Amino acid sequence: MRATVMHAAGDVRIEDVPDPTLIEPTDAILRVTRACICGSDLWPYASMQPSETGQSMGHEAIGIVEDIGPDVRRLKRGDLVVMPFAISDGTCEFCHEGLNTECVHVAFFGNNGMNGAQAEALRIPRADGTLYALPVGEDHALLPSLLTLADVLGTGHHAAVTAKIAPGKSAAVVGDGAVGLCGVIAAKRLGAEQIIILGRHPDRIALAREFGATDVVPERGEEAVERVLELTGGFGAESVLECVGLGSSTQTAISIARPGGAVGRVGVPQDEAMPASQAAFYKNLTIGGGPAPVRAYIDELLPDILERRIEPGRVFDRTVNLDGVPDGYRAMTERESIKVMVRP
Ligand SMILES: [Zn+2]
């Protein structure tokens, strides 16, 4: 079968690789019908050291269960499922708490040698806990929105939850990528009254406004901070969603948070140390977030998609086949595309 393999920064190839097979009795084989390229895939695309074997890429998918091991109980061949980006067993104490990304068996697709979803098929460990069966057919019109349940919608929602958004509150979203845009959807969904997005790309800003952003701040750094303070009565936003992961964006997030407020971080941190520690301390901020337990959020978010109250699939502005994946990485890196959908 064919799969996407990254060999070094800027070097993404489509290669023939062995078909996935069942290894453990709790495995399933997923035939991928929709996958996508993630903003977090762009970090290794910018910086990966050359690797002999390469890294199989992709951690978001919808697909058909093609085969199951003898211990898989909740899924059957032919099921249409969404594949969240993390493996979880669904049975440990963290999974029971709704924190599947801290599962005692957690691993991340398309990372550290795990197989990836920008491929025709892949092996799914602990399939019962990991996969989520969808109540629609494989050509359903809402598939793009359902695909966002694998990562970006759940991740934007996690930023909103950990930033403690509640009805009537003010929110600021740092980052206008697919996660930031889904953060706007989540902030509105949870009742934020004012939603400020920090971003400057016209296509993304237009979508943010349609998703519910009330204010746009195109400035960066200190100017952005001043602008957000002006928009929030001088004190800052009660809830800040950090959807980038750079030191500079984290600094901005902390600087625009209202004293006593909360920052929800879902951008993968690119630095070991967190900036603005003293500012966060003296403002009594709560800093939360981490890899989003998107598997646990599907029950809550799925009805809003099926009943068309939200349309997160609009973040996809380009669709490619596997051969188009390398150019998809380029297009997202150059901000020519917000998010690329892959139909293997
Ligand atoms: Zn678990």
Image (tube, rainbow, N blue to C red):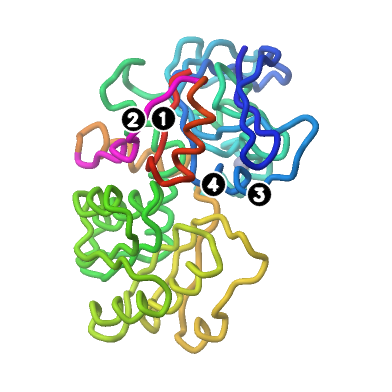
Nearer the N terminus, badge 4 or badge 2? Answer: 4
Disc 4/disc 3 C-alpha distance (Å):
12 Å
Q: Which mark is residue 40?
A: 4
Disc 1 target residue? 341
Disc 4 + disc 2, Cβ < 8 Å: no
Nearer the N terminus, badge 2 or badge 1? Answer: 2
Check disc 2 and report its element: helix, strand or loop: helix
Nearer the N terminus, badge 1 or badge 4? Answer: 4
Kind of residue sitting beneath label 1: Met
Tell me if residue 315 comes above or below residue 211 in the rendering.
above
Check disc 1 and report its element: helix, strand or loop: strand
Nearer the N terminus, badge 4 or badge 3? Answer: 4
Check disc 4 and report its element: helix, strand or loop: helix
Check disc 3 and report its element: helix, strand or loop: helix
Does 311 appear in magenta? yes
Q: Nearer the viewer, mark 3 or mark 1?
A: 3
Disc 3 target residue? 47
Q: Which residues are magenta?
A: 309-322
Looking at the picture, tell me which residue is in the foreground, 248 or 101: 248
x%, y% of residue 126?
63, 28
Disc 2/disc 3 C-alpha distance (Å):
29 Å
Disc 2 target residue? 144
Kind of residue sitting beneath label 4: Ser
Tell me if residue 257 comes above or below residue 128 in the rendering.
below
